[in-house]
């Protein structure tokens, strides 16, 4: 069914990307109950309306929406209906949902896919401007409002997201008008007002907290180090004696010996077996030597946690312990028959399976794990404790977000006299944006700049009421020629249609430096 | 700004007399009908039941490359939901942010409890020969080798999908396999050869 414009008693079209979404409120004359059909639930959710307006028979769309609620208007009996038409994705302002994971595609592609898959837009209805081609490595809507998540992402790149008068899904850079400046002389402005934030109402600092830094993103200078080692007496019982007690030195020693043979030398670091001269073969209950065909081992990371990258195996056998008439052990790189499987790893240890060692000459195996150590700048040291014969660092996951997450922080200057605004105020009024798709400090800084500009502009707002103008859209740059000229970007529009028709424009002032309010 | 010279000229007058219209635009924009608020999504979102926060012990032999039977993912659905013909998508990774993911598609069966359903046993773990492992970049090493696995699921039926479930995780640990029966599988059957089974402390799965 159509709604006759003659039955519309009054109508307000509110377009405001900063609020809860756009909507149209109207009062319909329903004396003959001809609009009672609109009370049907099926009609509520299936109908889609377009409102056009203009002059002298020429009209342009001012709103296109699809969901509506209505009720019998109170106080007027059954003679009128109160009807609200909402923008097409208004449900998603508050509804929580989860999306696919998006990896390594541009923000523009993410917006397009989400808009098509979850919001029901067609390709032709998605209008994305330039400046949204940054590649995001991980983006997901996780039990939150999809439209608010997208809007937060778009805002962080200096844009705004809204439905235009045609019902298109628009993403454009804020403060970059798409149209020529529209000028209004003072005589046409019915009323106007400035809304200026005082210094005391401003944020002094803005902080961007991005995605948590993943383990692979906080490795220390990409240099492979020895994470840990273990002696596996697969054929012999022996107890490992290490003559350098500080573990980091032992790891450095093993790092230098990766893939190389070595024998202990006097006065030099080495790893040897304390009971090597009295080795005994591993025996089973029956008294027979039973070499294990494979061993599963968990190697504890002796320094900080790291990502394992390689494993080095050395072995020595009783037959090769006597060199130049002197009893000593001789460690050789294991031959290719020794096989290592990486089973997995976590923050503290690496799980390995070692197999393929010989069953005849009963070796002792030294297994060293190499990898990339986590940078301890991202670990909060709590202290040092004495543990038996050694000291060790006590640490835990760092909970300070400026280290554990991608991060940037900026400080506003005092607009009156320079210097930090927080110094003028004597206090920090911090606004934090949590943007879990920000995957680098550089990107955090980029977003900081855009959101800093946004906060700055919000401090100087202007609004004015003019004769009804259906042509103006958000992002338009309007010039109000008052005693001084005010240039402002339109962020919100309200059309009031009834016995008297007007348009209220709200926006942020562009020519702030001119102080047009003075 | 919408461009229209006639309207622009009129709206710059002090006294204006605008006209307006409202039309049914249902068939002209977007989807012709709006009976599915999420577009392709109308199946209820599954609520995860297992494994969440579980640590599995993998029982490995000399040549075990993958679990013998994997694990079933279990989830709850509303009591009026008909699971026949449904499949379950599982996405999992050792990377918390799922920058690299593996997908698995499994049929669904009755999970043996009120409104509880389960997938087939899905192999989520593999061992890697050192020579292969060394070729992985760090992100892939985390994706394949980190012993905590993050996952979530969604339901597919007749070409439609549920929303994704919440994110959950489980962990793995490892030991050499031993001879003997040390537990039962998820269906209550005795396990006689534990090589390659995943043991969560209560049952083999």
Image: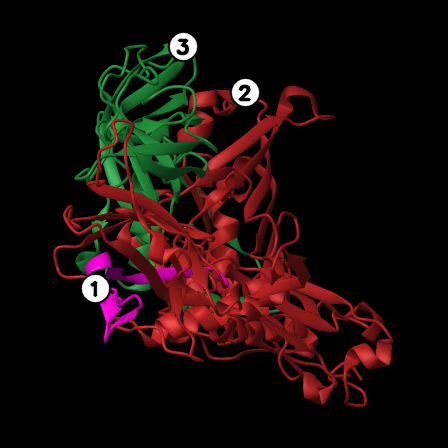
Chain colours: A red, B green
Taking the spot 46% from the left edge, 54% from the top edge, the residue there is A150
* Tag of residue B113: 3
Q: Position of residue B175 (x, y in %)?
A: 34, 36
Q: Provide the residue span drawn in magenta.
A: A304-333
* Tag of residue A33: 2
In depth, the one of A454 and B170 nearer the eye is B170
Q: Position of residue B122 (x, y in %)?
A: 25, 31
Instruction: Report the mark closest to the observer, 3 or 1.
Output: 1
Residue A108 seen in the current view: no
A372 on left or right of B83: right
Between the C-alphas of marks 3 and 1, the distance is 63 Å
* Tag of residue A471: none
Count of all numbered marks drawn on residues in the image: 3
Between the C-alphas of marks 1 and 2, the distance is 105 Å
Q: Are marks 2 and 3 in contact (CB under 8 Å)?
A: no
- Residue A15 part of the magenta-drawn span: no
Q: Quadrant of the N terminus of chain A?
A: top left
| Marked residue chain, label 2 | A
Q: Position of residue A393 (x, y in %)?
A: 61, 62
Instruction: Report the mark closest to the observer, 2 or 3.
Output: 3
Sequence-wise first label, 1 or 2: 2
In this rendering, the answer to whether A276 lies above or below A354 is below
| Marked residue chain, label 1 | A
Residue marked by disc 1: A320
């Amino acid at each position: 069914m159509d709604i006759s414009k003659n039955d519309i008693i009054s109508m307000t079209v509110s377009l405001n990307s900063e609020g809860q979404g756009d909507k149209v409120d109207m009062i319909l004359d329903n004396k003959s109950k001809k609009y009672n059909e609109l009370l049907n639930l099926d009609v509520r959710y299936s109908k889609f309306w377009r409102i056009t307006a203009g002059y002298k028979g020429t009209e342009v769309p001012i709103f296109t929406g699809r969901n509506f609620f209505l009720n019998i208007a109170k106080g007027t009996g059954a003679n009128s209906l109160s009807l609200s038409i909402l923008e097409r994705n208004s449900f998603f302002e508050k509804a929580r949902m989860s999306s696919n994971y998006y990896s390594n595609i541009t923000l523009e592609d993410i917006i397009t896919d989400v808009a098509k898959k979850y919001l029901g837009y067609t390709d032709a209805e998605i209008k994305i401007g330039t400046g949204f081609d940054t590649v995001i490595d991980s983006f997901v809507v996780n039990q939150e409002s999809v439209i608010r998540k997208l809007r937060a992402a778009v805002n962080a790149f200096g844009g705004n997201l809204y439905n235009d008068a045609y019902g298109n899904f628009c993403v454009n850079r804020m403060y970059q008008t798409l149209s020529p400046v529209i000028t209004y002389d003072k005589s046409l402005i019915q009323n106007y007002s400035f809304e200026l934030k005082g210094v005391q109402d401003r944020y002094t600092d803005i902080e961007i907290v991005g995605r948590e830094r993943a383990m692979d993103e906080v490795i220390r200078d990409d240099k492979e180090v020895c994470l840990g080692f273990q002696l596996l007496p697969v054929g012999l019982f022996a107890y490992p004696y290490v003559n350098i007690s500080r573990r980091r030195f032992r790891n450095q020693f093993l790092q230098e010996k990766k893939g190389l043979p070595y024998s202990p030398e006097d006065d030099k670091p080495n790893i040897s077996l304390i009971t090597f001269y009295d080795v005994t073969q591993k025996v089973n209950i029956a008294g027979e030597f039973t070499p294990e065909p494979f061993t599963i081992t968990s190697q504890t990371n002796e320094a900080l946690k790291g990502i394992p990258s390689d494993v080095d195996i050395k072995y020595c056998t009783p037959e090769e312990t006597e060199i130049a008439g002197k009893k000593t052990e001789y460690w050789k790189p294991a031959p290719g028959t020794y096989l290592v499987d990486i089973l997995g790893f976590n923050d503290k240890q690496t799980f390995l399976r070692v197999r393929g060692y010989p069953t005849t000459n009963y070796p002792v195996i030294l297994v060293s794990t190499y990898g990339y150590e986590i940078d301890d700048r991202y670990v909060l040291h709590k202290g040092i404790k004495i543990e038996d014969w050694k000291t060790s660092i006590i640490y835990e996951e760092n909970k300070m977000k400026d280290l554990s997450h991608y991060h940037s922080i900026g400080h506003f200057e005092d607009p009156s006299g320079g210097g930090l605004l927080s110094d003028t105020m004597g206090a920090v009024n911090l606004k934090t944006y949590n943007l879990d798709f920000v995957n680098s400090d550089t990107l955090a800084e980029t977003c900081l700049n855009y959101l800093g500009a946004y906060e700055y502009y919000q401090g100087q707002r202007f609004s004015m009421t003019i004769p009804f103008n259906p042509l103006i859209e958000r992002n338009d740059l309007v010039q109000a020629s008052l005693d001084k000229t005010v240039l402002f970007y339109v962020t919100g529009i309200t059309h009031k249609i009834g016995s008297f028709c007007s348009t209220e424009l709200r926006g942020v002032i562009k020519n702030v430096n001119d102080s047009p309010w003075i | 700004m919408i461009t229209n010279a006639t309207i622009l000229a009129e709206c710059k007058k002090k006294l204006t007399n605008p006209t307006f219209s409202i039309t049914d635009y249902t068939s002209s924009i977007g989807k012709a009908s709006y009976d599915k608020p999420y577009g392709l999504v109308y199946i209820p979102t599954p609520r995860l039941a297992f494994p969440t926060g579980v640590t599995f012990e993998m029982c490995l032999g000399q040549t075990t490359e993958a679990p013998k039977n994997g694990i079933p993912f279990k989830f709850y659905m509303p009591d009026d939901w008909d699971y026949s013909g449904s499949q379950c998508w599982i996405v999992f990774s050792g990377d918390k942010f799922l920058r690299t993911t593996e997908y698995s598609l499994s049929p669904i069966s009755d999970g043996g409890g009120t409104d509880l359903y389960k997938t087939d046993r899905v192999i989520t773990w593999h061992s890697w020969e050192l020579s292969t492992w060394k070729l992985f970049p760090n992100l892939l090493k985390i994706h394949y080798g980190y012993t905590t696995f993050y996952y979530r699921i969604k339901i597919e039926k007749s070409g439609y999908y549920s929303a994704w479930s919440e994110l959950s995780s489980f962990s793995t640990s490892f030991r050499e396999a031993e001879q003997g029966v040390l537990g039962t599988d998820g269906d209550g059957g005795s396990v006689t050869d534990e090589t390659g089974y995943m043991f969560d402390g209560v049952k083999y799965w």
